[in-house]
Amino acid sequence: MNMFDEISREKKELPKINTITKQLTKYELNTYQKFGFAIWIISFVLGIILGNIFSTCDVSGNFYNVDCVNREFNMSVMFLVWFSGFTMGISFFGLGHIIYLLTDISDKLEK
């Protein structure tokens, strides 16, 4: 048994870009999916802003002085906001996709 013959028998063609764009143009986003995208965009911007506002102390003056000499961007706050925004956004987008599929099934059953 030749492995390459089996691969050529099992091989499927990749979808063409033209068909992918046709599939995406006929798909409409509902309110939940739009809200999920809005959460992603807002959390991305808000993560950068909050990372800058709640900056961390890089270097303090000396042992007895607690003043910060140098402040730097807080990556952990930024990643926390990004992760929570991504999970909230994907939850709303998933809920919207489930609603879209159920309405599509309902429309097909009515015909």
Image (cartoon, rainbow, N blue to C red):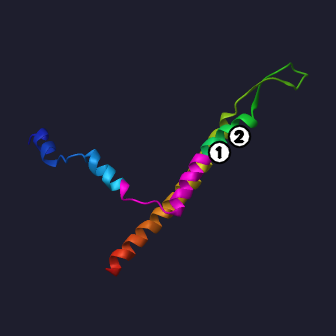
Q: Nearer the viewer, residue 98 or 24?
A: 24
Image location (x, y in percent) of residue 111: 31, 80
Residue 58: name its quadrant.
top right
Q: Which mark is residue 81?
A: 1
Q: Is residue 73 above or below residue 15?
A: above
Q: Residues within 10 Å of mark 1 (few under 14, many from 20)?
A: many
Q: Is residue 110 above or below residue 5?
A: below
Residue 46: in magenta span: no
**What residue span does the magenta drawing correspond to?**
25-42
Q: Is residue 35 left or right of residue 102?
A: right
Image location (x, y in percent) of residue 85: 60, 49
Q: Are marks 2 and 1 in contact (CB under 8 Å)?
A: yes
Q: Which secondary structure, mark 2?
A: helix
Q: Which mark is residue 50?
A: 2
Going by the numbered disc 2, the residue's amino acid type is: Leu
Q: Residue furthest right?
A: 64
